[in-house]
Amino acid sequence: MPGGNMRYDIAAPEPAGMVASLSSLGYSLPAAIADLVDNSISAKARNVDVEFAWRGRDSWIAVVDDGRAMDQDELVTAMTVAARGAHTPRSASDLGRFGVGLKSASFSQARQLTVLSRKGGQEHVRVWDLDAVERHGEWRLLRETDNETESVLRRIRPKGDSGTVVLWQRLNGYHADDVVADDEATQRQFYAEASSTEAHLAMVFARFLTGRGRRNLRVSGTPVEPWDPFMSAHPSVQPLSAEELSAGIGGLVRVEGFVLPGAHRLSAEEYDRAAGPQGWLDQQGFYVYRRNRLILAGDWLGLPRMRREEKYNLARIAVDIPAESDAEWGVDVRKANVVPPVSLRPHLHRIARNARGRAADVLRYRGKVAARTHGDPMVHVWSVRRPDGRLVCRINRSHPLVQAVLRPGGARTEDVHALVRLLEETVPVTTLRVMHETDACDDPEPFGGAGPADDQAVEVAQRIYESLVSGGRSPSAARERLRTIAPFDQLQGFWSN
């Protein structure tokens, strides 16, 4: 090993470059606010208020709590970037890890960060003004607030003897000269982000919003109602056997799968709520928790041959990891990425296969019921089959409305309109979802796929061509247009010569 007398340089990061790096970590606004709520919960706050105030370019966002506050030294430490290492011991309630969450989350959303903390009747304030940091090239942590900031703080100061305010001003995307208070479109966008934040917090902190010791979390005065991705209280949910997996020195990892009820067992309101903030497809998969805080929602963790498909929408799996195993699980600064340890991946893959299989069975049963109703050719206008392992979707020519349109002598206009509307309203989504085994190998290809057009394709193309000509195009222009219309852009015929 090299000796202690080795020569070296001090290569401290340049402030402007460091600010730019912290500001571009990729936080969404809801995720950034969730990082602030982490700090409130770690400080044992019972009440946490997230405030959105529209003031045009002077709009602001704040998080106010009644938790354990900080004295002056503690506040300066909290405002210092990476004041503690990832392996610094933490309390059982601490949801942070890297010591940069407050700063990186805040710098990603605002140019000015003010923190006021009241402890034992005394208030302490510190301010990061990123314009000042870049202008002076120094990490100047300001001790005083300007008049505008002081005016905001007077409105939202903690009401008790203890509490903290985190205030964002000069918000990214809103602090521009052309943003004015009566800009209704931008105002709607601002409050739409407030709604997205409420939904995100309802998912991330759901376990803190129920049961004994529950916290009260509000967004602009509206209580945040917890969102349970597993619908644990619904009688039709299928809970799978919970397992505890050994994670080596990191302790035990608890894994429990759930198969949600199909739409036929849910009210319209239950179905819409169960879809979650991102919708059914994006909410399927693993939900990784650390100290009851959701780290990752709706992801198959990069496991082999595990991708999002509609037939697995009802599969959701809870994974509880010990905080001490953050590094082994690859939890990043934003708490937005998780990579499971190699030793656990086979077990997670096995559990996921079981949950996905059962979820597909629920939809497959409903699809079989729907498919059985196709026995009467007079019932459905669509016919879905799988000859030779490929999906084929056809219009049912035995349907009375189809026969009316195809009858000799020409169809009535009202029959054509009725058929088009019927086709729009009865696309066989359920049957296709169940019969579609994979994403690609059985995809139906129009007229057999790319290559020379068969007689049926040529006949259809001829009718389109004649329609284009009768509509006023020249023959050459009609052929050129036909070459751009699917599926004839992939087929060879008189239009491609």
Image (cartoon, rainbow, N blue to C red):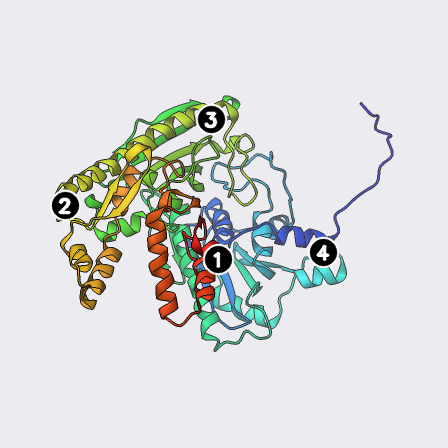
Q: Is residue 53 left or right of residue 218?
A: right
Amino acid found under the numbered disc labelled 4? Ala
Between 245 and 285, the one lying in front of the other is 285
- Nearer mark to the viewer, of 3 and 4: 3
Q: SS class of the residue under badge 1?
A: strand
Disc 2, SS: loop
Viewer can see residue 208: no
CA neighbours of label 1 inside 10 A, class few (<14), some (14 to 19), many (20+): many
Question: From the viewer's perspective, is the residue at label 2 or at label 1 nearer?
Answer: 2
Cα separation, mark 2 vs mark 1, equals: 62 Å
- Residue at x 23%, y 41% (from the top left corner): 234
- Which residue corresponds to mark 2? 377
What residue type is disc 1 on? Val
Count of labels in the image: 4
The residue pinned by badge 1 equals 63
Above/below status of 191 relative to 324 = below
